[in-house]
Image: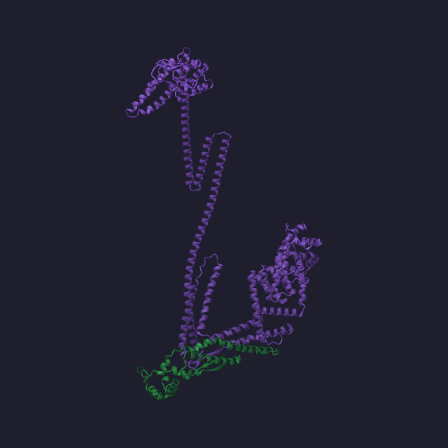
């Protein structure tokens, strides 16, 4: 099994590169009302048969966005945070909370089961595939960043192999 | 890609496991060989490559080998392109390049450059193979660039019209010349380009030329000037008309001639002034150096002719140094590199495999990072490649089967076919995707794999969709382009046809123009011929005229005929060549009219002349008749009534009658002529005309009676007067007695006497006295003349003069018998004329 020692190190740099790119793309799309998504980006490297870098985001965020049920469950602290972000007076947060809880903002035809206004508004936001765009934009840089490291790892592998086959050979580091 | 869409935003997978596992094994094999290689290389290059890591060796080896091979391959491609060598010949060139690359200072790539240089000079493969080793020696010996050495050696071979196999000789000569004189490869190149063809034409050898050039260079003459000067001097030596050749007494047509010429000139010890007379001012320096340096030229020529293998010796000396060793080692190493990439041995295969695995590995890595757009671009590229391949295949088939009329499918058709294929694949993938989605709804690893596959398929389907869109757009563009191409083709066809028409028209016009020109020329020649012939004919006529063989009239007629014939010939010519005949017709008509007018004028002139002649003749005749009549009267008067002179009197009467008759006859002729016209006139004019004619006839009858013997004299007076006598009848106051004398009327009166000539002669004084006494005038005073009855006009005739002459001379009138006889003769003549 090949040891991606150098590649793993490079993946750290790649992580930063991608997170930076993702945040930049969100800002470009004005998709930063709360900053929760941006703040949630993180990279994790897993070494198995393949070396995998996952740039992850907040699960909770996506739950709220994607799951109407979760969205419908009102969280007063979230409302207060949101109002603060928007520069609204948070003393009305309770009133908003109450109205949301009663489903006043909800569509009665949907039997009060539809997402509240926060979700509806958020759902109508024009979001593009910011992750895909970021990946596409940075793929060349990622490859450029990774190639030497992979090369080093392969070189090390070959060097080890040579050493193994020819123990007396004076093998020096390639890079 | 993302396995948890709620969490993972971007995923980077470095897939290396399976691919690199295989790579590890292959690398193991490769490095086993590379290890032994390292040892051998280290030993071979004296430690240059020692102490490198295997990978470094490999990576460096691979990188360097790629570069070397790339360079070499590129050079050899150029060689193939320039020489146009067949595969077999190219292999020979390639092998020799590698072989020379390994065994000489120069690398295979440099040898390939040499081959390119020779190829550019038009050397064939065989010639390159023959020349390249010698050129390598030259480059080694002179430490010059190999390509330049090839150019110089090749140019010298070509310039001196030598065979490529003689390159060794050229190189040896150059090697010796470069070491024995100030000549170097640059100077040699500069000067030889100018002088070589001229020297070759003069059959002056490379050695002799090089020797001269070396001597000139030794003297510090710049190569370009030396080359130009030497070329001009050689030209002068070859030119028999030049001062130099004349001075030498022969032309230089070989190396031996050159040697002879230089020796001769050197022996002569020419001064600068003398040299300036032999060559141009600009060549004097070179010429002087040549002449003065004859000895060194000849010795250098000998040395150059003895040069055999000198270049090889020099190259060996150069090679026998540390630098030479290093260069050789480098070349050998490059040979090794080439053998790695160009060869097919175990090491080559292993190393290439490593590189290929690297490529494959990176490809896999990049594939996973590709978006739908990128994949779509790949699909599109692949599809376009397929289309191109199909197109090429079609063309190849068409090329092979030239005789068969194979119609290639258009690019649009091929694109459509490819689109159909992609769509078909797309449909298949969609079906598979549906299955995968269905399977992916379950749990477990299979479902997960299915979901992954579904994701991949979705991506591929999206990518294919993009590719399809692009392909469709390309197809539309292609269809438009084909349409435009067809339109353009039609337009081009039209243009071509139009051009063809124009060209044909132009050609026809030119042909017509040529034909017209030829016809015009022929027409002019023919016209000139006709003119010349006409002139010649005219000259002949003139000659005839000058020699008085023909008259002027005949000449004029002949000239007219000749001119008309000329014009007629010209007219025929004009008709034949379809020229405007109006001018010629006009000329012919004008000439005819002129001729008619001339004829008419001539006839008129002749008629006028005849009239004038007739009038003159009439006048003369009238005068003669009058004179005769007068003579008759005078004779009658002179004879008087004297019996003795009766015959004279009768003769006088007859003469007078004859004169009157002649006058009357003429008048009658005129009268009769007028009568015929007058008879047609109305009454009474016709009666008057007839009456006047009758009167004339009566008068004539009387005269004729008198002429026939006196029977016609009615009053007797005439008879008496023949011998003189008295006039009886009316006085002058009563109108007098008129007598016709010589066509004139003489008036006497009754009582006057007429004394005949003889009596007057005898008794003139007495008669004069008698006349004077009676109131008349004396005869001496011209009384006869002043007689009122004899007006001056009555003596205007011939007789008057004679009478006047007689009176003037002696004052006497003497008529001798001979006079009468003569007068009678004259009368006879006049009578006969009158009859006529």
Query: Image quadrant of residue B499?
Result: bottom left
**Can the viewer see residue B630 in this picture?**
yes
**Can the viewer see residue A52 in this picture?**
no
Q: Which chain: purple? A: B
| Residue at the image point whose x is 36% and y is 82% from the top | A119
| Residue at the image point whose x is 51% and y is 81% from the top | A8
| Percent of width and height locating residue B694 | 32, 20
Query: Image quadrant of residue B180?
Result: bottom right
Q: Is residue B27 left or right of residue B567?
A: right
- From the image, which quarter does the C terminus of chain B lie in? top left
Closer to the camera, B24 or B251? B251
| Residue at the image point whose x is 38% and y is 82% from the top | A67
Query: Image quadrant of residue B59?
Result: bottom right
Q: Is residue B472 left or right of residue A171?
A: left
Total numbered badges shown on the rendered structure: 0
Closer to the camera, B822 or B533? B822
Question: In the current view of this chain or complex, which residue is farthest to the top?
Answer: B643
Q: Is residue B281 above or below residue A171?
A: above
| Percent of width and height locating residue B757 | 42, 15
Q: Is residue B475 above or below residue B237?
A: below
- From the image, which quarter does the N terminus of chain B lie in? bottom left
| Percent of width and height locating residue B318 | 67, 67
Question: In the current view of this chain or complex, which residue is farthest to the right?
Answer: B267
| Percent of width and height locating residue A48 | 49, 81
Q: Colour of chain A?
A: green
Closer to the camera, A127 or B268? B268
Q: Is residue B748 left or right of residue B328?
A: left
């Amino acid at each position: 099994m090949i040891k991606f020692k150098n590649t793993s190190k490079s993946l750290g740099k790649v992580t930063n590169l991608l997170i930076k790119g993702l945040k930049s793309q969100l800002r470009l799309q004005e998709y930063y009302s709360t900053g929760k998504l941006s703040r949630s980006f993180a990279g994790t490297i897993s070494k198995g048969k393949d070396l995998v870098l996952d740039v992850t985001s907040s699960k909770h965020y996506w739950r709220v966005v994607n799951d109407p049920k979760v969205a419908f469950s009102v969280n007063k602290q979230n409302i207060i945070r949101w109002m603060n972000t928007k520069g609204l007076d948070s003393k009305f947060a309770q009133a908003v909370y109450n109205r949301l809880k009663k489903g006043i903002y909800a569509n009665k035809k949907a039997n009060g089961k539809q997402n509240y206004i926060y979700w509806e508004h958020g759902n109508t936001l024009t979001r593009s595939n910011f992750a895909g765009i970021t990946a596409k934009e940075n793929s060349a840089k990622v490859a450029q960043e990774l190639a030497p490291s992979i090369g080093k790892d392969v070189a090390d592998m070959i060097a080890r192999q040579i050493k193994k086959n020819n123990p007396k050979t004076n093998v020096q580091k390639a890079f | 890609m993302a396995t948890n869409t709620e969490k993972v935003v971007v995923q980077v997978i470095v897939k290396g496991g399976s691919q690199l596992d295989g790579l590890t094994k292959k690398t193991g094999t490769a490095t086993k060989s590379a290890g032994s290689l390292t040892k051998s290389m280290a030993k071979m290059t004296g430690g240059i490559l020692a102490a490198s890591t295997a990978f470094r060796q490999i990576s460096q080896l691979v990188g360097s080998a790629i570069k070397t091979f790339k360079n070499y391959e590129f050079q050899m491609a150029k060689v193939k392109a320039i020489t146009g060598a067949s595969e077999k010949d190219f292999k020979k060139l390639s092998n020799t390049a590698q072989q020379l690359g390994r065994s000489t200072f120069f690398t295979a790539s440099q040898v390939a450059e040499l081959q390119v240089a020779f190829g550019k000079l038009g050397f064939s493969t065989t010639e390159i193979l023959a020349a390249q080793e010698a050129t390598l020696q030259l480059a080694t010996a002179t430490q010059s660039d190999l390509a330049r050495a090839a150019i110089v050696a090749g140019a010298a071979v070509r310039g001196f019209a030598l065979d490529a196999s003689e390159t060794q000789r050229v190189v040896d000569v150059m090697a010796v010349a470069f070491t024995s004189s100030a000549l170097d490869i640059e100077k040699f190149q500069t000067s030889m380009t100018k002088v070589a063809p001229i020297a070759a034409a003069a059959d002056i050898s490379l050695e002799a030329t090089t020797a001269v050039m070396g001597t000139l260079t030794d003297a510090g003459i710049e190569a370009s000037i030396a080359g130009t000067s030497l070329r001009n001097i050689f030209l002068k030596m070859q030119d028999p008309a030049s001062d130099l050749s004349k001075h030498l007494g022969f032309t230089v047509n070989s190396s031996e001639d050159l040697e002879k010429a230089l020796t001769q000139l050197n022996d002569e010890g020419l001064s600068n002034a003398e040299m300036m007379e032999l060559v141009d001012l600009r060549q004097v320096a070179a010429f002087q150096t040549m002449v003065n340096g004859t000895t060194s030229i000849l010795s250098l020529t000998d040395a150059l002719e003895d040069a055999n293998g000198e270049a090889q010796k020099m190259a060996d000396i150069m090679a026998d140094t540390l630098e030479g060793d290093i260069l050789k080692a480098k070349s050998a190493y490059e040979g090794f590199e080439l053998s790695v990439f160009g060869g097919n041995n175990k090491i080559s295969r292993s190393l290439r495999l490593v590189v290929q695995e690297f490529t494959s590995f990176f490809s896999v890595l990049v594939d996973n990072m590709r978006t739908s757009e990128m994949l779509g671009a790949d699909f599109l590229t692949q599809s376009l490649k397929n289309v191109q391949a199909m197109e090429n295949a079609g063309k190849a088939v068409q090329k092979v089967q030239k005789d068969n009329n194979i119609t290639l499918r258009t690019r649009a058709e091929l694109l459509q076919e490819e689109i159909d294929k992609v769509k078909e694949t797309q449909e298949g993938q969609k079906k598979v995707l549906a299955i995968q989605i269905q399977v992916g709804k379950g749990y477990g690893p299979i479902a997960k794999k299915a979901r992954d596959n579904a994701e991949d398929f979705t991506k591929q389907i999206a990518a294919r969709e993009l590719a399809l869109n692009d392909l469709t757009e390309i197809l539309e563009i292609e269809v438009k382009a084909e349409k435009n191409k067809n339109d353009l083709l039609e337009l081009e066809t039209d243009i071509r046809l139009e051009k063809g028409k124009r060209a044909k028209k132009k050609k026809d016009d030119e042909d017509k123009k040529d034909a017209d020109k030829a016809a015009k020329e022929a027409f002019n020649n023919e016209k000139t011929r006709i003119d010349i012939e006409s002139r010649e004919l005219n000259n002949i006529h003139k000659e005839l005229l000058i020699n008085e063989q023909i008259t002027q009239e005949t000449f004029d007629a002949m000239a007219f005929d000749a001119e008309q014939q000329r014009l007629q010939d010209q007219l025929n010519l004009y008709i034949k060549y379809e020229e405007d005949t109006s001018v010629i017709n006009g000329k012919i008509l004008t000439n005819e009219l002129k001729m008619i007018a001339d004829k008419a004028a001539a006839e008129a002139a002749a008629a006028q002349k005849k009239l004038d002649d007739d009038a003159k003749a009439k006048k003369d005749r009238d005068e003669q008749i009058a004179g005769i009549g007068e003579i008759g009267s005078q004779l009658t008067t002179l004879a008087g009534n004297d019996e003795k002179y009766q015959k004279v009197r009768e003769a006088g009467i007859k003469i007078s009658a004859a004169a009157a008759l002649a006058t009357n006859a003429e008048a009658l002729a005129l009268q009769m002529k007028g009568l015929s016209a007058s008879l047609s006139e109305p009454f009474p004019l016709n009666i008057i005309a007839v009456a006047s004619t009758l009167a004339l006839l009566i008068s004539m009858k009387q005269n004729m009676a008198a002429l026939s013997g006196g029977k016609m004299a009615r009053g007797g007076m005439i008879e008496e007067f023949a011998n003189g006598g008295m006039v009886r009848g009316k006085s002058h106051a009563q109108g007098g007695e008129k007598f016709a004398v010589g066509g004139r009327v003489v008036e006497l009166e009754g009582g006057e006497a007429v004394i005949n000539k003889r009596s007057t002669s005898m008794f003139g004084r007495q008669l004069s006295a008698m006349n004077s006494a009676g109131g008349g005038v004396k005869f001496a005073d011209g009384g006869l003349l002043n007689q009122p009855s004899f007006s001056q006009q009555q003596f205007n005739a011939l007789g008057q003069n004679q009478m006047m002459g007689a009176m003037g001379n002696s004052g006497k009138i003497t008529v001798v018998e001979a006079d009468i006889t003569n007068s009678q003769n004259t009368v006879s003549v006049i009578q006969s004329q009158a009859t006529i």
